[in-house]
Image (cartoon, rainbow, N blue to C red):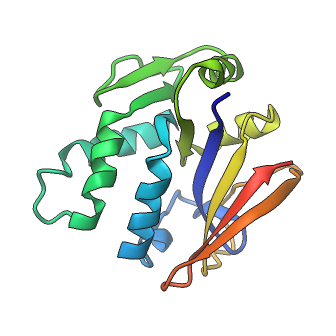
Amino acid sequence: MRKVVLSMNVTLDGLIAGPNCELDWHFERWGADMAHSLCEQLSKADTIILGRVTYTAMARYWPGRAADMSFPREDLAFAEMMNRYEKVVFSRSMDTPVWNNSRFVKGNAGKEIMQLKQQAGKDIIIYGSGKLVNSLMQLNLIDEYLLWVHPVILGKGKPLFKDKINMKLMELKRFDSGVVILYYKAD
């Protein structure tokens, strides 16, 4: 069975975005070592799950990156995978894909994820998509949590966790910027 893996940037105080959805805090510490690790993670998957808000932002950003000469060269392989992989988008209001290999699901997220897990293939990865992530956590459908913990405290914003979840720490990876990835398996 395929695994559902959440890869999420989070602050030390457990927030995934500022009170007005600010994400600038996680771009400040980005480095080539992190780009390499992110690319390695994505290479283990072949399907990306997104909510409407995250999909809209990524669909505006990723399609033109490979041709953009100012785009960091160390991120090219990641951009290629983002554009090539299947993207399953959960949205009640969108139905016309604007990014290649995208399809929209309006129905039951839990049922769709269970069907995806039963199919042959590599891991299924989730980026961002806080509301969707919370609903999948409530259904115990996330198998692994890759938390990119940034040495930043926002004080207020959007929390990742709203309910108790038991996890087992599998691995820890440290970057030069002070960011660490905590690899957890759902318990």
Q: Quadrant of the N terminus?
A: top right
How many numbered tags mark residues here?
A: 0
Instruction: Answer whether residue 131 is visible to the viewer in this image.
Output: no
Residue at the limit of the structure toward the top, as seen here: 107
* Apparent side of residue 52 relative to residue 154 in the rendered image (left or right): left
Residue 46 position in % (x across, y down)? 45, 35
Residue 29 position in % (x across, y down)? 45, 78
Residue 105 position in % (x across, y down)? 52, 18
Q: Residue at x 69, y 17 (%)?
A: 111
Q: Residue at x 76, y 51 (%)?
A: 185
Q: Residue at x 48, y 28 (%)?
A: 89
Q: Residue at x 55, y 16 (%)?
A: 106
Instruction: Answer whether residue 116 is visible to the viewer in this image.
Output: yes
Residue 17 position in % (x across, y down)? 57, 60
Determine whether 41 is above or below 169 in the image.
Answer: above
* Apparent side of residue 56 relative to residue 116 in the rendered image (left or right): left
Seen from the viewer's position, the closer of residues 127 and 11 is 127
Determine whether 8 is above or below 50 in the image.
Answer: below
